[in-house]
Every structure is written in structure tokens, then in C-alpha cells.
Amino acid sequence: MIQWKQENPEGDTMSEIYDITIVGGGPVGLFAAFYGNMRQVKVKLIDSLPQLGGQPAILYPEKSILDVPGFTNLTGEELSNRLIEQVKRFDTPIFLNETVEDIRKEGDLFTITTSRQVHQSKAVIIAMGGGAFKPRALDIEGAEDFDNVHYHVSNIQQYEGQQVTVLGGGDSAVDWALAFDKIAPTTIIHRRDNFRALEHSVEELKQSSVSIKTPFVPSRLIGENGHATHLEITKVKSDETELIPIDHLFVNYGFKSSIGNLKEWGVELQRHKIKVNQKQETSLPGIYACGDCCFYEGKIDLIATGLGEAPTAVNNAINYIYPDKKVQPTHSTSL
């Protein structure tokens, strides 16, 4: 992972006013920062995490990202690195390890209070994904005591030839099972007969050599000295059990996300997300949102969707600050 060296730059205090402050350093926030620089406005970015890249960088560094057009084998880490490299073309102040606690409109400016300092900005774009995220834990007694129970994957090659079991039935679980299947004997366990992943991925799974156990739930881990050797699974609505030998168990039950102080910022929420209009504008003029943190009718939570929303948010934020500037900029393809 590329490390951003411009963490918490000195001299950027309350007295320095920016055009757009972006809250969130995941793929959508990074692209919004890049695009804002392309429009030649003064942009800064704040993120609560210690590194840029969001969920793809931290939780899925080696997982293939399938919803970015034109790239078929792009991993989470590669996507994050490319977006970081893109932003590095410009002198963008990046503030890591800063949690936004409050956003208030004071006159023509927004005052953004974080866990470390105060920022001022003419407009704000919120691109904080699903908020603070934490993997849903495996609800088995003593699961946290075993060193081979994992919630994300790094350096997938280290598991070559070992007995791997994946828990879950969504896109990530199926994608991981397919990735492990190339290097190790793999089992996937899901509590329903039907998987919730993309149809093509499910078809691939069925045609692979992955051992599919449905509908089963994990019921007990067996092991000693902090290392699990077997997973007991129980068939749903039955007393039937099986014992699965494991070297490594990967839990992929999704995440508990927290929107933190978002409720107190004054923006209208719907389904725990920020409600926006076709301009990506929130209920508060001058505050925009894009990516997984926002909601509108028909919204699809994909990275590709968020990357498309980012320029809309940036262009409309610029038009809010500078009404004489066009919302639709001139592009090289139209010259």
C-alpha cells in the first residue's frame, strides 16, 4: 500500500480557507479530491483512518474488485494505490486520523470540527462510505481466542495448500472462495441454499472445486493452544452436524457500520444514509454527499456508481461557491 507522507500538514489552520473539504479517504473521496483539483479549486481531504483507501485498501487488499469498468483483475490494494497516485499529482492536504465531530454553517463558511483541530471551507463533500466499519463477528463461544479465525485477507499466497473454510453467502464470501480455490482446498458454508452474490460468480462457484455446504451454520470450534483444528457445522432446522477440518477460517458476514455524529450535522437522513438530490446536494445547501453514504431512489451501492457521483458533487459544489462557473466543464473530447 502506498503511504501518504503528507499526513496532517503543518500550517493548515483555521485561518486557511479551502473551497471544498472532502470527508472520507476511500475510492470515492480520493476521486472527488482528484477531480476537484482538475477543476482548479482548493481542496483538502479528511479521513478518520490512519491510511487512505477505505474498505478496499484495509479489508480487501487482495480481493478482485469487479465493479470498476475496464479492469478485470484489479485488487483492492491496486485500486487504492492508483487513486492515491492520481491525487498525488496535486498538492492536496490530507488529514489522517481525524474524526469529523461537527459541521456548522457560520456566515458564508462551514466550520468543520475534528478530533484534532478546526477547518474552514466554502463547501463540503461527504464521501465517508458506510461510516465507521467493523466486521460482524463470528458468534461462537471462544471464537476470538483462536489465531486462525480471520476477518480479512492479506498475502493470499501464504495459505497455499492449506485447508481453508469461508463463512458467508454474499459477493465477498463467494469471491474469496473462488480465489482460495486456485491455491488451496476450500469449503464455503452458508446458512441458506441460495447465495446472494452476483449470478455469474455463483455459477463460477458451482462449477469450481469448492466444497459447498448449505444450508449450514457454524456451531462450534474445536482446537487447542489458541489454534482451531475443526469447525462443527449444523444443518438449519435440523440436528444434523458435520465436522470440517480447518487450517484457516475466514468470516465474511459483512460489517456493522456506524454513521457516528452524522445525525447531529443537520443533514436529512433516509435509511441511515444522507438523502441527496440529482445534484448530490444534501438538505443543507453547500454540503454534498456521494458514494455509499448517500441515498436517492434507485441508488446502487457500487464503487463505479460512487466514482460517477463524485464529479457531480464537485461540479455542483463549485457552482454553489462560484455561481458564474458552469456546472458542466469543457472536456478535451468536446474541443
Image: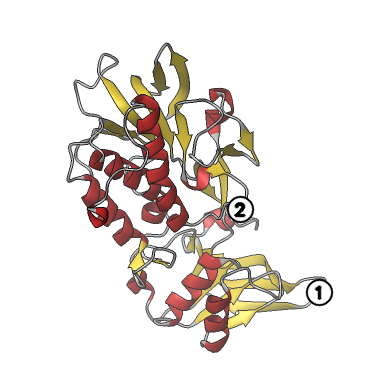
Estimate the x, y position of residue 52 in percent, counting from the top left: 32, 45
Tell me where residue 29 sits by quadrant: top left
Residue under circle 2? 298
Q: Is residue 241 above or below residue 10?
A: below
Which label belongs to residue 155?
none
Q: Nearer the viewer, residue 250 or 51?
A: 51
Q: Secondary structure at mark 1?
A: loop
Structural distance between the alpha carbons of marks 2 and 1: 42 Å
Residue under circle 1? 239
Residue count near mark 2 (Cα–Cα under 10 Å), binned few <14, some 14–19, many ≥20: few
Q: How many marks?
A: 2
Label 2 or label 1, whichever comes before in sequence order: 1
- Check whether the beta carbons of the residues at disc 2 and disc 1 lie within 8 A of each other: no
| Observer able to see residue 275 | yes
242 displayed left or right of 258? right
| Tag 1: amino acid | Asp
Q: Secondary structure at mark 2?
A: loop
Estimate the x, y position of residue 79 in percent, counting from the top left: 32, 59
Question: Residue at horizontal 55%, vertical 62%?
Answer: 252
Question: Residue at horizontal 23%, vertical 43%?
Answer: 4
Q: Which residue appears farthest toward the front when viewing the image?
A: 335
Question: Residue at horizontal 41%, vertical 59%?
Answer: 60
Mark closer to the observer (2, 1): 2
Q: Nearer the viewer, residue 325 or 85?
A: 325
